[in-house]
Image (cartoon, rainbow, N blue to C red):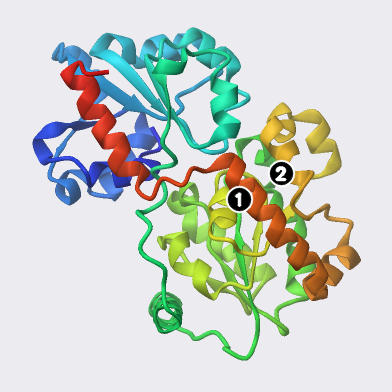
Amino acid sequence: MSTAHLENIFLNFDKNDYDIVFMGPRSELECRDRAYAQKYNCGVVSVNEVIDRKLRYKLAVTMWGDHQSKNRIKKYGIPFIAEKTLLVASIFDCTYGIEYLKNFPYNYIVCCGEFHKKFFGQFFKTENLFMLGSPRFKAKATESKESDTTGIIEAARKLILEQAGRNINPAKKTILILPSYNNVVSSKMNCATIDFLPMLAKLQNEYNIIIKPHPEWASSWSGCKDFFCKALPNAVFLNNVDNFMLYPIADFVICDYSNVIFTTINADKNIMLLNAGRNDVKKYYELRDPVNSYLRDRIINFYPDEEEKFFAALKDESIWEKQKAIRRDIRSEFFTENPNPAKDIAELCRRIVKGEV
């Protein structure tokens, strides 16, 4: 599940160490589109094939499955195809999966920071819980010099030119918009950002605007791009680009929900959160998830009817001075100082398979 979040772990294994087992048509499409078999030179098989062939693994490593259905948990067959299971928890989507945790027999959990360690500690023994960080983040390099930073920014500008066929104006500040893919707001193309497009359109002449949708939109990218192009014709639209490549040139990052909020906070970028409509937040538990509440109590956020507040915030330097300190506190709560989580998670897998853990 969520292979994009596990890719950095793959890089720490030899080709004979593992198979990628996809579950369901969406995962199969992702494995095919990303050419995992060729990219990582490993086996890529379906869970049905694994069960038919009665394969048995020492360890199954996964992220969230379908936490809403006990039948699907059984159907996926993870407990039957592996002796032990390891959940690599995402930074965001965990605290509303309590029933899932109760019904799915995980043997081990890797979490990202103190916030989640406390949460998972309610359900798992301390010796089965490892706070190693998120494998989504690449290994940290040594401190960058100013010249290195300039080179990174130029590389990002070059990438945009290659992908979008146009430059962004270095004399203007840049707003990076990273809409999520959130099923609970399906009437709004699965993202709360839709309600804000008329407001964002008013910024097109003053700011560079870059829009990079969630990878889940890839299969419907053409329609998605047309939709945004109509609302924001002056914006740059990108697909199939890692967000980490775009952060260096962003002065502000706009998000709504999901893990991208934490990748932005970890990158220490000025972040503005867009809220789903007030009625949606009351209706959907996922939007009232404790992590969402935690973030919106601290990070500046807006409803669609708060246009003046939104525009004023972009110009108010005092807000961003305070927000920088707030982001630092959030990072200490949700992240570890581990410079290479993916490497350590891979090593944990090896130790589990050897029976050392």
Q: Amino acid at mark 2?
A: Leu
Quadrant of the snapshot with the C terminus: top left
Quarter occupied by residue 4: top left
Q: Mark 1: few, some, or many residues within 10 Å (few <14, many ≥20)?
A: many
Residue 77 appears left or right of 287: left
Q: Is residue 171 above or below residue 111?
A: below
Tell me what residue is drawn at x 50 percent, y 50 percent: 217
Provide residue 64's location: percent of width, then percent of height: 46, 27
Q: Are marks 1 and 2 in contact (CB under 8 Å)?
A: yes
Q: Is residue 82 above or below residue 293?
A: above
Q: Is residue 20 above or below residue 239?
A: above
Q: Is residue 315 above or below residue 92?
A: below
- Circle 1 sits on which residue? 261
Quarter occupied by residue 79: top left
Provide residue 11's location: percent of width, then percent of height: 23, 47
Q: Nearer the viewer, residue 172 or 304?
A: 172
Q: Amino acid at mark 1?
A: Ile
SS of the residue at dot 2? Answer: helix
Residue 313 appears left or right of 249: right
Q: Mark 2: few, some, or many residues within 10 Å (few <14, many ≥20)?
A: some
- Circle 2 sits on which residue? 295
